[in-house]
Image: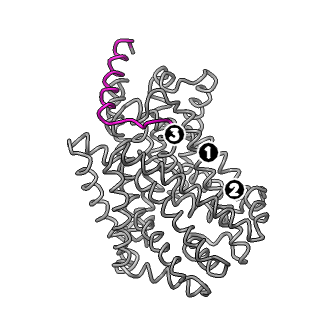
Amino acid sequence: MSYSSSATATGAQEGAHSKRGFWSSRLAFILAATGSAVGLGNIWKFPYITGENGGGAFVLVYLICIAVVGIPIMMAEVLIGRRGGHSPVNSLRQITQRDKLNPAWKWVGAIGVLAGFLILSFYSVIGGWALSYVGTSAAGQFSGQTADAVGGIFSGLLSDPMTLLSWHTLFMALVMVVVARGVSSGLERATSILMPGLFVLLLIMVGYAMTSGHFGEAVSFLFQPDFSKLTTSGVLVALGHAFFTLSLGMAVMMAYGSYLPKNVSIAKASVTVSVMDTGVALLAGLAIFPIVFANGMEPGAGPGLIFQTLPLAFGQMPMGTLFGTLFFVLLVFAAWTSGISLLEPLVEWLEEQKGMNRTVSTLIAGLVCWVLGIASILSLNLWSDVAPLGMFAMFEGKTIFDLLDYLTANILLPLGGLLVAVLVGWFMSKQALQNELSLSEGGFNLWYNTLKFITPVAVLVVFLYNLS
C-alpha cells in the first residue's frame, strides 16, 4: 500500500471515529472489554468444569490455552475493529477493499454479530435467574433448607413462564438502557462502576471463604496439578472454555476495538484483559470451592453448582443470607456487563447500515432479542418436549434453549474464531498488521506465527470435537 493511500484511509477512519466516539482512555477500554469477557462463564461455568475435570491440572492446561488461543485471537479481533473503524461487518468490508481481499470475508463479522445476538436471547434468561436469586437469597428462603427444598426452588422458577418472563424483561431492560446511552455515557460509565464493584464483591466473597476452614483445601485443588485426573476430553474442554471466556468469535472485540484510539497498544490491552478475566475465574474458584468443601459437597456438581449446590451451602452457614445475596449480586453484575457487549455489535451495525439513531437501533435490536428469549423461556416448561431440529441426530432431544446454546457455542463461535485467525494470519497485509500493533520484531513474530500456525489448529480441533 502506498503512503498516500494509507494516509487517506487513516484520515477517513479518524473522520468516522470522530462521529462515533472513542474510549476515553486505555483503562476505559480494558474495563469494558473485561466486562464483556467476565460473565457467567467465569463465575458459573469455570468452577463447575474445573470441578468436573480434576482441578489443578485442568487449570494449568486452561492457562496455557488462554496464552496460545485466547490472546492471539483477541488481538486479531481488536485489530480488525480498530483498523476498520466501523461495526464488525463494515470494518471487514473496509479491510477487504483496502487490502484487495475477497469481499466474502465480511461475513466473518456477520457470523459474530449473529452469534452474539442469539447468545444474548438465552443469556438474558439466565441473567434473569441470577436477578431472581438475589431476592430469594435476601428473603432468607435458603436458610435451613434441605437439598430437595433448594432444588424445588430452582425447578419451581423454571416451571413458571410468567415469572421467568418478568426477570428476562428486567435483565434486557438493564442491558438496553446502558447500550442506548452510547460509548462514553453508556458503555464506559456502566463498566467503570460495575467492574470495580464486581471485583470488590468477589474479594469479599473470597475473604468470607477464607473463614470456612477449607481455604487451603481449595487452593490445593485449584493449583496443585494431578495429571492422573486429566483426560483428553478435559484438555479439549479447557481449550474450548479458554476461547469462549474471552468473548471471542462473537464480534464483541471487533466492535469495542472500533472505538479504540490509535495510541493504545492492542497487545498490552489484550493481555491485560485476558489476565483480568482469568483472575476473576480463579478468584471465583477460591470463593466457591472452600464453601463446597466445608459442606461436604462435590466440586464436580455440574451446572447446578451455582443455582442448587451453593444456595444449599449458604443456607447452612453463619451469615449465609448476607453472603449468598452478595454472591448473586456479583453474578448479576457479571451477566450484565456481558449482556451489554453482546447487544453492542448489532446496535452499531444498525446505526451505520440503516441510519438509525442510537436509541432506536437499541430498542429494535433489544426487542427482537427479548422476543426470541421468550422461546427459550417456554422451552424450559410449556415447550419442554419441543425439539425443532429433532429430525437430525445431532440435535435430537434439544429444546430451543439447548439448540441456541449448542449452535452458538459449538458451531458459530469456533467457526468465527477460526475464520478470524485464518483471515488475519494468512490473508491480511503483514506490514499493515505490524503498523497496527507497533510491537517489537520478536513480539510481533511470536504473535503472528502463533496465530497463523498454532491457533487455527487448536480451534479446529475443538470445533470438530464439539461436532462429533
- Residue 236 appears in the figure: yes
Q: Secondary structure at mark 3?
A: helix
The structure residue drawn at horizontal position 61% and vertical position 81%, both measured from the top left corner, is 315
Q: Are marks 1 and 3 in contact (CB under 8 Å)?
A: no
Where residue 448 sits, quadrant-wise, is top right
| Position of residue 122 measured from the top left corner of the image (x, y, whole percent) | 40, 64
The structure residue drawn at horizontal position 37% and vertical position 42%, both measured from the top left corner, is 109
* Label 1 crowd bin: few (<14), some (14–19), many (20+), radius 10 Å: some
User: Mark 2 or 1, which is nearer the eye?
Assistant: 1
- Kind of residue sitting beneath label 2: Phe
* Residue 313, placed above or below residue 261: below
* Closest to the observer, 427 or 357: 357
Q: Secondary structure at mark 1?
A: helix
* Residue 246, placed above or below residue 391: above
Give the labeled residue for mark 1: 275
* Closest to the observer, 56 or 134: 134
Question: How far apart are the two marked residues, 2 and 3, measured between alpha carbons?
Answer: 31 Å
Give the labeled residue for mark 3: 27
The structure residue drawn at horizontal position 40% and vertical position 62%, both measured from the top left corner, is 404
- Kind of residue sitting beneath label 1: Val
The quarter of the rendered structure image containing the N terminus is top left
Q: Which residues are magenta?
A: 2-27
Q: Report whether 409 appears left or right of 361.
A: right
| Position of residue 130 measured from the top left corner of the image (x, y, whole percent) | 48, 69
- Kind of residue sitting beneath label 3: Leu
Give the labeled residue for mark 2: 58
Q: Is residue 450 magenta?
A: no
